[in-house]
Image: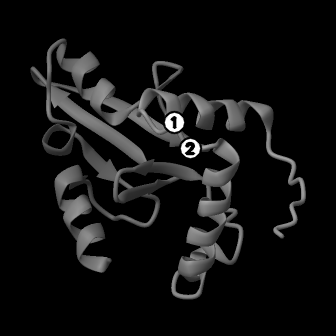
């Protein structure tokens, strides 16, 4: 016989999980998925040390590229530079939170590839670097 305990999960997070399962046609009980997530964490924590300590580093996770708090982002369009900055866990442009793709599209007014249009200068960088180059470096480190 299996026994169970209750683990407090924020209501909003649990409802997000329920909606995600529903929208993806997954009929599993959300509690079963939570158990699977715990098992996944346990399987990975031994070889991913970052899972064992809570990070106090703030920043924006852009796919495989982490942009720490204080990272500057710029894009040149029609001879003018436009700037955004990572503040906390968000990219801020004109006072509002925005994704990298939306930033490039907003600046240009049409569909752009943010990896090829945005330049990054993280707090430890001495020079601006194309986002796609930073992504390649991050992928090579994995």
For the residue pair 47 and 54, the one nearer the viewer reads as: 47
Q: CA distance from mark 2 to mark 1?
A: 8 Å
Compared with 3, 121 (above or below) is above
Check whether the beta carbons of the residues at disc 2 and disc 1 lie within 8 A of each other.
Answer: yes
Is residue 66 among the parts visible in the rendering?
yes
Compared with 110, 87 (above or below) is below
51 relative to 4 in the view: left or right: left
Looking at this rendering, what residue extends furthest in the front direction?
Answer: 1
Quadrant (top left, top right, bottom left, bottom right) of the N terminus: bottom right
- Mark 2 or 1 closer to N-term? 1
User: Residue under circle 1?
Assistant: 21
- In front: label 2 or label 1: 2
For the residue pair 46 and 79, the one nearer the viewer reads as: 46
Looking at this rendering, what residue extends furthest in the bottom direction?
Answer: 46
Percent of width and height locating residue 75 = 23, 33
Percent of width and height locating residue 70 = 52, 49
Residue 3 found in image quarter:
bottom right
127 relative to 17 in the view: left or right: left
User: Residue under circle 2?
Assistant: 28
139 relative to 27 in the view: left or right: left
Percent of width and height locating residue 139 = 26, 69
Residue under the point 40% across and 45% down: 72
Residue under the point 14% across and 15% down: 110
Residue under the point 90% across and 59% down: 5
Residue under the point 56% across and 28% down: 19
């Amino acid at each position: 016989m299996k026994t169970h305990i209750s683990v407090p999960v924020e209501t909003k997070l649990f409802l997000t999980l329920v909606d995600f399962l529903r929208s993806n046609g997954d009929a599993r009980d959300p509690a079963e998925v939570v158990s699977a997530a715990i098992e996944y964490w346990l399987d990975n924590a031994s070889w991913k040390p970052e899972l064992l300590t809570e990070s106090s580093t703030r920043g924006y996770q852009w796919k495989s590229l982490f942009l720490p708090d204080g990272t500057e982002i710029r894009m040149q369009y029609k001879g003018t530079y436009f700037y955004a900055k990572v503040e906390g866990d968000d990219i801020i442009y004109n006072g509002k939170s925005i994704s990298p793709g939306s930033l490039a599209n907003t600046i240009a007014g049409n569909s752009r590839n943010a990896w090829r249009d945005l330049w990054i200068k993280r707090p430890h960088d001495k020079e601006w670097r194309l986002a796609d180059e930073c992504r390649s470096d991050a992928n090579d480190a994995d």
